[in-house]
Image (spheres, grey):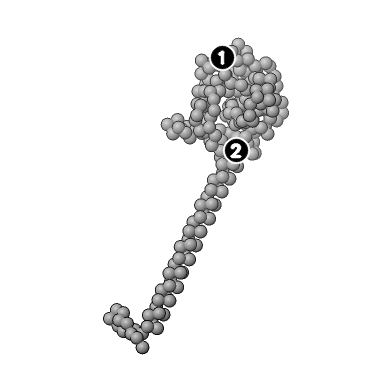
């Protein structure tokens, strides 16, 4: 029987073949382990992506500001985080900045797409709102609006009215250019059209701040 010298020991050809087969089995096992590890990692990535998608769709939504209607609070091009769960168990409060959809008539009359709008809630259901000498009064009292830039108020006018149940009255901080609840095609916004509450600005990073 043929013998070979391995590690200074003579072994038979049959033994060499056996060792080779055992080595091949170990390699196959290792290859299978790598494959399963790769598959496990891929499934982990898919799970992370699905979780991120769920968070974005259901909980927190990054939205880019488009336009100048909320200057100086929000600037065109900034990215804000909108909390979609904020009004699950409560309704918007005065002063909240919300993301909302306008009534269908607005989009039709303006020949626009059904995009969301970001505005500030200034009155809620049951409130009476109006402007007197260019200032906003709610329930007979002038509201304090420190977020307004006097140069951006313009000739704002709000006819005296009471906000219906299930609605909020919204205005842009840049009153001179904002199309909001003052317009007949917009009016008070039904709560089911309020998407969520703006929590903070995250981009550009130098402008990051809580709302």
**Label 2's element?**
loop
Q: What number is the disc on residue 84?
A: 2
Q: Is residue 186 visible?
A: no
**Label 1's element?**
loop
Q: What number is the disc on residue 194?
A: none
Disc 1 crowd rating (10 Å Cα; few below 14, some 14-19, many 20+) is few
In percent of width and height, residue 209 lies at 47, 32
> Mark 1 near mark 2, Cβ–Cβ under 8 Å?
no
Give the Cα separation between the discs numbered 1 and 2. 32 Å
- The residue positioned 58% from the left and 28% from the top of the image is 118
Q: Is residue 202 left or right of residue 90?
A: left
Name above or below for residue 114 compared with residue 156: below
In the current view of this chain or complex, which residue is farthest to the left? Answer: 8
- The residue positioned 64% from the left and 32% from the top of the image is 194
Name above or below for residue 35 compared with residue 26: above
Q: Is residue 57 left or right of residue 30?
A: right
Q: Is residue 108 visible?
A: yes
Q: Quadrant of the N terminus?
A: bottom left
- The residue positioned 60% from the left and 39% from the top of the image is 85
Q: Is residue 49 left or right of residue 5?
A: right
In the current view of this chain or complex, which residue is farthest to the bottom? Answer: 1
To which quarter of the image does residue 198 belong? top right
In percent of width and height, residue 100 lies at 62, 31
Name above or below for residue 134 compared with residue 72: above
- Viewer-proximal residue among 77 and 133: 77
To which quarter of the image does residue 192 belong? top right
In the current view of this chain or complex, which residue is farthest to the right? Answer: 165
Disc 2 crowd rating (10 Å Cα; few below 14, some 14-19, many 20+) is many
Q: Which residue is mark 1?
A: 154
């Amino acid at each position: 029987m043929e013998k070979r010298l391995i590690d200074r020991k003579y072994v038979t050809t049959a033994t060499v073949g056996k060792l080779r087969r055992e080595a091949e089995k170990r390699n196959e096992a290792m290859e299978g382990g790598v494959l399963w590890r790769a598959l496990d990692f891929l499934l982990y990535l898919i799970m992370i992506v699905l979780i991120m998608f769920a968070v974005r769709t259901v909980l927190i939504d990054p939205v880019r500001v488009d336009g100048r209607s909320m200057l100086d609070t929000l600037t065109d091009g900034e990215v804000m985080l909108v909390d979609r769960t904020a009004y699950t168990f409560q309704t918007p409060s005065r002063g909240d900045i919300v993301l909302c959809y306008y009534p269908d008539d607005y989009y039709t009359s303006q020949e626009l797409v059904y995009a969301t709008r970001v505005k500030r809630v200034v009155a809620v259901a049951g409130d009476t709102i109006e402007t007197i000498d260019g200032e906003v009064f709610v329930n007979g009292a002038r509201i304090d609006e420190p977020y307004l830039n006097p140069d951006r108020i313009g000739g704002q006018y709000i006819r005296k009215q009471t906000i219906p149940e299930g609605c909020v009255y919204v205005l842009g901080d840049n009153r001179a250019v904002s199309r909001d609840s003052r317009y007949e095609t917009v009016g008070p916004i039904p709560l089911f059209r309020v998407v969520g509450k703006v929590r903070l600005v995250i981009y550009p990073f130098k402008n990051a701040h809580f709302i």
